[in-house]
Amino acid sequence: MSSDVIKEAQNAIKVYIDDIDEKKIEDRTLDKIDTLYKIFLADIYVKVKPTFNESSLIKDGVARIKKEKVAKGASKQDKINFSKATIGELISLFRQENMLDELVQAHKNISKEVLFIKSWNKYEQWIGWALDFGEDSYLATHIAKLTHSSSKGSSIDVRYHTSCDKYNQKYLSTNEKPILDTAYPDNKYSSISKFYNIEVKGQYIGDLLRENGEKYLTLFTNNNELLKTWCDCFSKYIKNENKISYFLSKQTYFPTEDNSYHLLLPLTSSSLVHKLFLEHKNYFEDEQKIAREKKSNKKYSPTITCTYPNKAYLHVTGSNHSNASSLNGKRGGRIALLPSMPPQWQSNFHFYINKSSIFDKSLGFELKHDINDLKKYLLLIKNKSLSTSEPKRNAAVISKLQAISNGFFDYVEQVNNSMPKANWTGDTNLPIEQQLLFESWREDDTAIAMKKNKQWEQVLSQSYGRWLSKQLKQKNKLSLTAIHEVLWADTFSTELREYIAIQEASL
């Protein structure tokens, strides 16, 4: 490991602990000392109980001392002082019965430990607290609490479980560089896992302490024994090698050969869930909104848009979503579920086999955007009492007619591409000119006879003109005449000849 990485890691640890309120660190240390005294007192009471039958003085004295309670609302220091005073009273009581030797020695040991803790700097105090409560805190990709927020089962960091040593086989995984989540027994200890999740030059503090913490932690203490304890505990806790299940976990019996089975323990991949969460979150960004608006208006946008239809959401926690994991808190406790059904996005055009004409409501719906664009323009011209014969306005109308024709031919190709076999039009009820629109390459006798005089193109263009006038008249005040139908047909006829030529040239 380079010296630059070590220095940067040490600096990151220092900055992280420096950002923690010193009063909070001090209070945690006082809690630790108070707990040591309470454990010491509880141990004394257990050891002295067998002497009650031999000495009523001891029995009555202990009962009297135990009745004394610390004042309500006492500070942490007051509680420590109360425990020390209680120990002093017990020593005075036991002195009368010559029971001091064991008690005095135990008291010396606890006093020495308390003095040692009080001598710690703030870094030693915080790290000591982290080790006291960090046994179930570590980096993870698959979180047990996402199955049930009260689960006490182990979470998994898949980066360290890529293969099975027993069978020398690799595991199938979707991850390349997962977004790491953090596991912890309670949200109040989440800062320990957050400490592990600090990234330094592409590596995490938790990973560095997992393998060899001495070089990163030596800056924060001059006590070699304390340093060794830190390194051993961090490595043990972060590796979390003793994985356990829990009764709130889910289990699946997976059959194998020889009528046997594996008992699988499914864990939610918080890393994968979070990648989906970030992907779905992008949907509501301004850039995506602008791109979708352009798409709906059939305009170009360099931004790629992607939608995920039929999503569902699973809520895995109550009000405090960070209780489950840090990433779950960022997701608001929601896990997005994608549908597992086969894709339904490809339109099915097989119904054309039973149709008698392409010019119907379905076609109108497919081309409604371009048709409405022409409607609005014609209404504008009419409302302003203008003529479409003026060159610029006529060119605008022709351009909008071409847009409708282009959409029409795109639709025809979609229908053709969806059909399971060639020469499908021969089995339909469509007029012969519409059959040739779909399959102009047909070489049967009927098709050849129609194509010789090009009459079918004119018939098709006239049908198109009548259909388009009908679409434009719907729920509008446009007064369209036969002259308009001829204009629509003539414009379409030009586009049709070009389309047919391209089709024939591609054969």
Image (cartoon, rainbow, N blue to C red):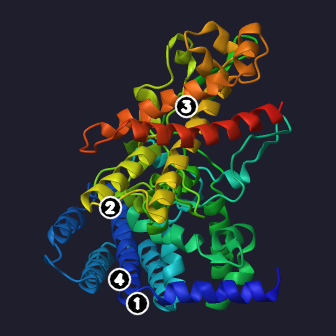
Nearest the eye: 47 or 130? 130
Which mark sits nearer the N-terminus, 1 or 3? 1
Q: Are marks 1 and 4 in contact (CB under 8 Å)?
A: no
Looking at the image, which is closer to me, 421 or 38? Answer: 421
Q: Quadrant of residue 188?
A: bottom left
- Kind of element beneath mark 3: helix
Say if mark 2 contacts mark 1, CB within 8 Å.
Answer: no
Q: Residues within 10 Å of mark 1 (few under 14, many from 20)?
A: few
Q: Is residue 380 visible?
A: yes
Amino acid carrying label 3: it is: Ser
Q: Which residue is mark 4?
A: 27
Residue identified by numbered label 3: 461
Considering the numbered disc 4 on the image, is that residue within a helix, a strand or a loop?
helix
Q: Position of residue 87 (x, y in %)?
A: 31, 78
For mark 3, does the 10 Å Cα neighbourhood hold few (<14), some (14 to 19), or many (20 or more) residues?
many
Q: Nearer the viewer, residue 69 or 326?
A: 326
As rendered, which of 185 and 354 lies closer to the eye? 354
Instruction: Evaluate whether residue 186 shows in this view.
Output: no
Which is closer to the viewer, label 3 or label 4?
Answer: 3
Q: Three-letter amino acid code at disc 4?
A: Asp
Q: What's the amino acid at mark 1?
A: Glu
Q: Which quadrant does the C terminus fall into?
A: top right
Q: Earlier in the sequence, mark 3 or mark 4?
A: 4
Q: Residue at x 28, y 75 (%)?
A: 90
From the image, tell me which residue sits under label 1.
22
**Residue 159 picture quarter:** bottom right
Q: Nearer the viewer, mark 2 or mark 1?
A: 2
Is label 2 in a helix, a strand or a loop? loop
